Image: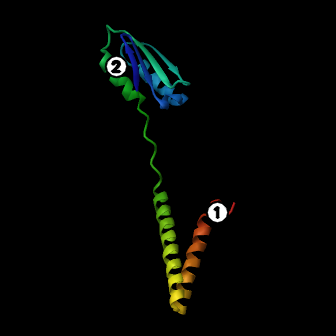
Amino acid sequence: MIVSTVAGRIRVRSNSLKSRSFAEQVQRGAEGLAGVAEVRTNLAAGSVVVIYDVREVDAEALESALEALCLPVPAARRPATAGFSRQLNRATKIGMVASLGSAVALGFMGKKKAHIGFGTAFLALAGMHIWRNQRTLLR
C-alpha cells in the first residue's frame, strides 16, 4: 500500500485506486484528515500522494489512517437464491452420472426393466439440465 514516505509526503499505491469513484472517495477522506495540505490522485498509476504538515500530525498516525482509507470495500454477497440454484444444478449432474452408470451396468447384466428405469431417469435429468442451461448450451 504505502510505497514511499518522506517527511511531509506519503505515496500510497493500490489497484483499487485506478477506479475513479474509489479514488475520489479516498481523496475526499484524505482531505478531511488533520494536517493534510494537499492530496493528488493518479488514476493511471493507481496512486495517491498526500502532502502534510509535519508539525501538525504524526506520520505514523497519518499512514495508518491512509491505509484504512485505501482498503477496498468488500464485494456484496450473492443473493440467497444462487445457493439453491447451484445445489439443484449439482444434484442434477450427480443424478445424471449415477443413473447413466447404473443404466449401462444393468444393461450389461441383462436386467432389462431396471435398465429402462435408470435410462428413463437419466433422460429426465438430462432434459432438466438442458432446460435449465439452455441459454449457454443451445447457442
Residue 83, above or below 104? above
Q: Residue 95's mark?
A: none
Tell me which amino acid carries mark 1: Leu
Describe the element under mark 1 as helix, strand or loop.
Answer: helix
The residue at the far front in this view is 108
The part of the image, by quadrant, that contains residue 68 is top left
> Residue placed at 53% from the left, 29% from the top?
18
> Residue placed at 51% from the left, 70% from the top?
92
Tell me which amino acid carries mark 2: Leu
Side of 70 where 136 appears, left or right: right
Side of 136 where 112 appears, left or right: left
For disc 1, the neighbor class at 10 Å (few under 14, some 14 to 19, many from 20) is few
Q: Nearer the viewer, residue 98 or 136?
A: 98
Coordinates of residue 27 in the picture (x, y in percent): 47, 22
Q: Earlier in the sequence, mark 2 or mark 1?
A: 2
Q: Please name the residue that numbered disc 1 is placed on.
A: 137
Coordinates of residue 55 in the picture (x, y in percent): 31, 7
The residue at the far right in this view is 139
Coordinates of residue 93 in the picture (x, y in percent): 51, 69
> Residue placed at 30% from the left, 15% from the top?
58
Q: Are marks 2 and 1 in contact (CB under 8 Å)?
A: no
Q: Please name the residue that numbered disc 2 is placed on.
A: 62
Residue 37, above or below 81? above
Residue 100, above or below 25? below
For disc 2, the neighbor class at 10 Å (few under 14, some 14 to 19, many from 20) is some
Q: Quadrant of the N terminus?
A: top left
Residue 56, above or below 130? above
> Residue placed at 50% from the left, 78% from the top?
101
Q: Quadrant of the C terminus?
A: bottom right
Q: Nearer the viewer, mark 2 or mark 1?
A: 1
